[in-house]
Image: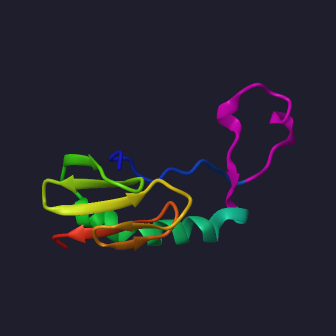
Amino acid sequence: STGSGLSFGIINNFETKFMETNVEKLYSMYYNDNKEFIISAVSKYEKIYNSVKDSKIAHYDILENNITKTTFENGVCIYANHSSEAQDSPIGKLAGYGFAVGGKK
């Protein structure tokens, strides 16, 4: 709903010499432990990102039941549930913290 994309901080080799530093930016996920998670996340969001590629957010509406609707200039709408519980939305039930695409495809 913010117009932002996926972001991952990953490292290839774990270096113990950085464990006692105060540099927060060094905290990253170990690549080998998270490779499948990253592939799964990218796969899950790829179709949605492609559907709104090169399109700006035109409207952002806060609906009932902790549901938001983000409408893009190309007509694609993304409904998001900002609640941990499943909620009814204009396009059906959304799982807790779930989302669905509606409108033009």
Task: Indicate the quadrant where residue 37 lies.
Answer: bottom right
Q: Along the line of sight, which residue is nearer the eye, 2 or 87? A: 87
Residue 60 in the image, given as x and y percentages of width and height = 25, 46
Residue 18 in the image, given as x and y percentages of width and height = 81, 35
Q: In the orientation shown, which residue stands out farthest toward the left?
A: 74
The residue positioned 25% from the left and 69% from the top of the image is 102
Task: Indicate the quadrant where residue 78 lies.
Answer: bottom left
**Vertical relation: 43 (above or below) 59:** below
Total numbered labels placed on residues in the image: 0
The residue positioned 50% from the left and 67% from the top of the image is 86
The residue positioned 47% from the left and 66% from the top of the image is 42
Q: Is residue 39 left or right of residue 35?
A: left
State the extent of the magenta-drawn residues as a range.
13-31
Q: Is residue 30 within the magenta segment?
A: yes
Display colour scheme: rainbow
Q: In the orientation shown, which residue stands out farthest toward the top?
A: 22
The quadrant of the picture occupied by the C terminus is bottom left
The residue positioned 73% from the left and 64% from the top of the image is 33
